[in-house]
Image (cartoon, grey):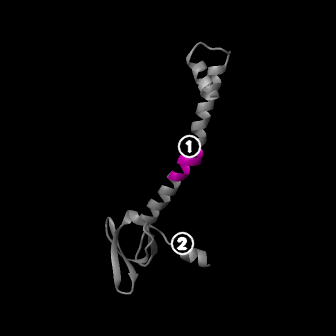
Amino acid sequence: MRFLTIFLQAEGAPAQGGGSWSFLIMILLMFVVMWLFMIRPQQKKQKEMEKFRNELKKGDKVVTIGGIYGTVKEIRDTTVDIEISNGVSIRVDKSSLVKDFSDAQQA
């Protein structure tokens, strides 16, 4: 309710001396906070995943988005062959791969 009152005061004739400026500053501050806590970390995570996928090499342990653990067997332009068991391999899209954190958790 208070937000609506402030918004209507900013649209109409100024009821107070600096009411519209404080509203604009508050909106700007909300966008800055949203960028710092939501957009920026997501962009950083996306860059790390892109770097990981570009630096894949044979023998790397990976996990697919679907939860399939395996070892990289062969790398192509957009796909990767993953060995999930002895003699069993599947071909998946590179964008469906994430890091295998199981080794880091066991140490």
Q: Residue at x 61, y 28 (%)?
A: 3
Q: Give x and y (percent) for residue 106.
A: 60, 79
Amino acid type indicated by mark 1: Trp
Q: Give x and y (percent) for residue 46.
A: 48, 56
Q: State the separation of the CA atoms marked 2 and 1.
A: 28 Å
**Mark 1 highlights which residue?**
35
Give neighbour class at mark 1: few <14, some 14-19, many 20+ (Cα, 10 Å): few
Q: Residue at x 65, y 25 (%)?
A: 22
**Which residue is at the far right?**
17
Determine the main secondary structure of the stretch shown in magenta.
helix
- The answer to whether residue 44 is left or right of residue 9 is left
User: In the depicted view, which residue is nearer to us: 65 or 50?
Assistant: 65
Q: Residue at x 52, y 54 (%)?
A: 44
Asked if residue 31 shows in the view, the reply is: yes
Amino acid type indicated by mark 2: Phe
Q: Earlier in the sequence, mark 2 or mark 1?
A: 1
Q: Give x and y (percent) for residue 45.
A: 51, 57
**Mark 2 highlights which residue?**
101
Q: Quadrant of the C terminus?
A: bottom right
Range shown magenta: 35-42
**Which residue is at the far bottom?**
86
User: In the depicted view, which residue is nearer to us: 70 or 40?
Assistant: 70
**Which residue is at the far front?**
1
User: Which quarter of the picture shows residue 71?
Assistant: bottom left
